[in-house]
Amino acid sequence: MKLKSLFVMILMAVTAAVGTLSGCKDNDLWGDLPSEISQFITQYFPSSDIDSFSESSNTYHVRLKDGPGMTFNKNYDWETINGYGMPLPEVLLFDQLPPALYSYLEETSNLGSVFSMERDKASYTIVLLDTTLHYDIETEEITGSPAEQS
């Protein structure tokens, strides 16, 4: 009888330990993120859980559970944000896009149709539901013309 009780107690302890370890997985990933990236995610994708995080010599890749994937450079600036089929938050667009590009998206009623965005030193690329826009930082020229959404 004592052996059976001991076995049950050990089984319960192992079950609790496994549950605790699996519950810490996401917390471990949050702890691995540089604080600048963590703050970015918290600001624009609050209450999100991290699915994966990796880093190489010059880039950081983050994928949120059931959400976007992001790439950041060595200075923690975003380079790509892909919604993977979900539109990106308008507040993110307002804060992170050049005013002329944001205004263009607003005027064409496409703020809710931005599914991914990418930037480098020279330009921004915005993927909408029906087209891709290119924005030249130097000239502020926008190429590609989306249909106005109603």
Image (tube, rainbow, N blue to C red):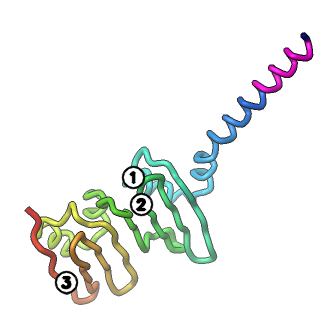
Label whose residue precedes the other's in the sequence (1 or 2):
1
Question: Residue 147: x percent and y percent?
Answer: 12, 74
Question: Residue 97: x percent and y percent?
Answer: 28, 70
Q: Residue 68 carries which label?
A: 2
Residue indicated by mark 1 = 45
Q: Which residue lies furthest to the top in this view?
A: 1
Residue indicated by mark 3 = 144
**Which range is magenta?**
2-12
Q: Nearer the viewer, mark 3 or mark 1?
A: 3
User: Which of the image's four quarters has the C terminus?
Assistant: bottom left
User: Which of the image's four quarters has the N terminus?
Assistant: top right
* Residue at the image position 21 percent from the left and 60 percent from the top: 112
Horizontal arrangement in the rendering, residue 22 relative to residue 123 (left or right): right
11 part of magenta stretch: yes
CB under 8 Å between callouts 1 and 2? Answer: yes
Label whose residue precedes the other's in the sequence (3 or 2):
2
Residue 131: image quadrant is bottom left
